[in-house]
Amino acid sequence: MPNYEPAFGLRDNPFSPRTFAGVGGGLLNGIEGEPLPLDEAPALEPLFVPGAGPFQAAIDRFDRFLEIGGYRDDDPGGNLDSRSFRIIGPEGSGKSTLANMLVRRLKDCGHHGLTPIRASAEDSQLAESIEAVEKKARQEPDGVCCVIFDDVRFGCERPLHDLHQSLRGTLRRPVVMFEIFHHAQDLGVPPPSDRARLDLEDLRTLWLTADHAVAFLISRIELFRVTDSVFTDELATFPFDVAEVAELVGESDGAEPGAFTLRSFSRLLSRGLGLEWMARRDDAPIKDLPAEELAARRISLKTFYDHRVEEQAGAWG
Amino acid sequence: MSRANPFPAYPVATLLPANDDQDRMTVNTAGIEKSERLLRSFLSGPESPGSQGLLVAVKGDFGTGKTHLLTHAENQLKARADERGSAAGVVVAGAMESRPVAWYRAMLGPRIGRLELEELSTDLYAQAAVTVARRAPLSAGLATRLELDPAAVHPLVSDELLSSSSVDRELIAILERIVPDAPQVRRAALGLIEAPASGRRWFEGERLSQREAVACGLTQAIATDEEAADVVIALAAIHRQLGRPFMLVIDELEHFARLDEARSGKSNLTWLKRLLERLEKEGACVFVAGHTSAWNGHPDFLERFSLGSAIELEPLTAEDVIHVVERFAPGRRRFAETDARLVNTFCGGNIRRTLGLLHALYDRSEGFEVPITEGMLAEVAATSTRVVDPEQALDDLGRALEQDGMRISRRAALHDLTFDLVAYQSDCPVLVIEAKHALFGRKQQDQAQRFVDKLRIVNQDSPTCIGVFASSGAFDPELLKVGSQAARVFWFDLNRPDFVANVMTTIGPALHEPMPPDAATAGSDRDDALTALADEIQMIKESQASDYARLEDQLAAPGGSDSELQFRSPAMTDTHDERRAIFEDLSAYPPLRRQLALISGPALMLMTLGLGLGLALLLTSIFGDSLFRETEEGESAQAFIAIGGVILLLATVLLAARQLLLLDRYFAFKRERLRDIYVLERPIQLLIETSRAIDEALYARGPRLAIGSAVELLEERELVADHRLLRREAEGSASGAT
């Protein structure tokens, strides 16, 4: 198993760790490119970086719903509000991770029946999915009904809205539904109908900005930094240079299409660090090096990116 | 030793793709030189190739070289664009006497299918990716790489070295900018990236299955004239966006105009005018060629063309004839001006006739080593086959049929099948004609078989319609004896000087014989039939409108289902020979042993039981004398058992015969379905899938219910082009079975 400590002063690869306290190995496979399963493994929460996108704003809005909707009341028998949340954003921008995070917070309220029902809303199987969700929901006699619909396409809002109403009406249970919209439909989103708008809330994820990238990098490196390593503030993100990352990721404000998303950035860092470890694993440990030499041994994000491009170039021939 | 004759035996230019041999023999006439000047000016626009559009009208009589000029212009544009490092997109199609959307489906769409559509969409996608890559310093270097190798865009995006959502969004922004008024075409262009096979088929004018259409967010097929125009405009706009020249070549305008004349309207030419105006704005180059008469009737149409760009093809001069000889047979110094004048006078300046005559004279004059004489010309006129001009021959035949009281359509479509000429009586097709040239007997046989197949499809709705197949080149009446079955087909040698008279004499009685009672009833009920047809069309339109509305509601542009049947384009790989071989293979009647094996379980059980019991009774009555008492009752019982045995055996034979009859009907049905697909030149994959579905029905339901079940399966799997026809046939078949 690679030891990142001598070369980088890190306990593991911060972007694709093989182990994490309290989390089974299976959940970590390919974690750099997959949504964080925060609802299943709350211990993974430290890997979630609210500043790596507009996640904190979404969490705050959801928390407000939990407050106002009665989910955090002490009285367990009180009436609970129902709501659908549309999570809309580019592919790889953290929509599913955000949904998992919100489900985690819902579960933390301590109500019954909070095993989320997951379904795919791909057009060809929407009817079957809705039927399966209704069937599963009926099998739970009481408690909050939580549904996560992935791959939703615009145009499927009406059947999902009807499902929401049906679950509320027939089961007489509060329903919290997350609809994760497929990226392609974010290209010219029509407004939902007025009828659906009443109990629908939109949460958005965005393309990666320089600030998001820096926040993600700092948070992950800090989390995996070996505590007895001594780095100056300037080298806090060693082996990466925060200023270079901010400059290279670009000036997108996240609302306009940028070149990267959180997932592509995470994969880039993970693959790059892995490759760099291969090159440096036999070098002298960095803890003995003076700060000036450490600064000189920082590695360039551009190098990683070009390396990935070259890898692909090999594939094109 | 005789020299090889360098002049073509069949001097008719064709709009075949990459017709380099034809172009190599181009003689620089005034028209050719003018077309080259116009193309040079078109490609040297101030900003980029085709920054200003060019509309060229080519006028001339039959045999003046219009089609040859068009193919020459096509090759010139491609070659000059290649020199500049950009691939030109050229769509070449002959016009038809039909509405624009039908023309699109039959001619233009398949020709558009020959464009490198996937490459075009990839280049556009790469252009979007370049814009996205430049937004971040980290990926800026990628832009240069993508400009050099646009195909790299797919692995780069799939590996998330660029955000796929960003590239998609940028691509949509580009398409919205360059194709602002045609959302369907924009979606089809996106479909070329997400589901290339479906997107391509939509552009080719084919009908998508419901699932494919939903997956791509498209209507099932191009349904209106406007949509057909939008597709052509969008292609021009995409080429312009990529800095590639785009050229549309339309030949035989007169066919397109003739529908307007027949309807006393202007809708076809108005559609074409609008198309040309829009293409010019998109910087496209358009060549439209037609017989002089087609242009003369529409001076306002001619005004749409770029100023000074009309090319009027004149008859050849004697000097031109010398140039032709120099081009085809260089070094024939003995072919003098007097010879050229003789040839030109004989042919009236018609290039086709000139080439044909030169072919004939070359052999008679020892390769032009001896002077041409009047005697030689007289000999050619008297003995050799005439110089074939199929277009002229068909026009002459059309006129003769018109004088016989028929309405004529040239290049008309029936059941999506095109014929060179269709003659109508009381708006019912009574005669379809196809003229073909073949150098080899096998090819001629193939052409004839295909014609018979097409005629049989027409006969399903017009049983009295007869067919005329005119063949030139390797005409061999023996070879033409292909299986015409019930269809009435007549074969003619197009080379014969009395071709028209021969056709009229031969088919006259067949054309004027009274209609069969069924057909007569259909004729008398024509108004009812037309009303029913109008209702049916209205229903289809409404169904399409509701489909369209539903699809509009769904903003989906999902990736296509992998399990979806992806048909290959016929233009890509399937050859006619392959298609025919597979059709014959799949539709062949199996041997009797195999047919017996296909008899369904219960029937087989009954037959076995009947056979066993019948034989047992019969044998008992014959050899079991000891079992019966020698009394009157005993003998009666013995006779009764013998009769029972015979009856059982007879019943078994009858049951077997019925099963075989049902199987025969099933195989006929299967062959008909496969023939429809084969004749329409649909992909081989579709032939195989249809055969498989029909066989599944037989295995699952047995011979008695196989046809009905097969119809349901075919409809369910969207494997039929015309559901109504199929349903009607199945109903007919079911009533027959009952």
Image (cartoon, rainbow, N blue to C red):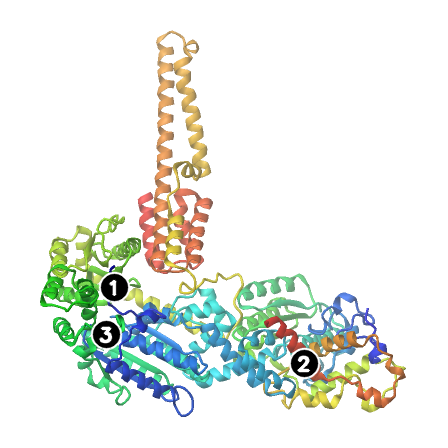
Q: CA distance from mark 2 to mark 1?
A: 65 Å
Q: Is residue B606 visible?
A: yes
For residue B185, which quarter of the picture? bottom left
List the residue tagged with mark 1: B5
Q: CA distance from mark 1 to mark 3?
A: 14 Å
Label 3 crowd (10 A; few <14 / some 14-19 / many >=20): many
Chain bearing mark 1: B
First along the sequence among labels 1 and 3: 1
Provide the secondary structure element on which disc 2 rests: helix
Q: Check whether the beta carbons of the residues at disc 3 and disc 2 lie within 8 A of each other.
A: no
Provide the secondary structure element on which disc 1 rests: loop
Label 1 crowd (10 A; few <14 / some 14-19 / many >=20): some
Q: Nearer the viewer, residue B242 or A173?
A: B242
Q: Residue at x 38, y 11 (%)?
A: B634
Chain bearing mark 3: B
- Amino acid type of disc 2? Tyr
List the residue tagged with mark 3: B324
Q: CA distance from mark 3 to mark 2?
A: 63 Å
Give the label, 3 or 2, closer to the camera.
3
Label 2 crowd (10 A; few <14 / some 14-19 / many >=20): many
- Amino acid type of disc 1? Asn
List the residue tagged with mark 2: A305
Q: Residue at x 55, y 86 (%)?
A: B131
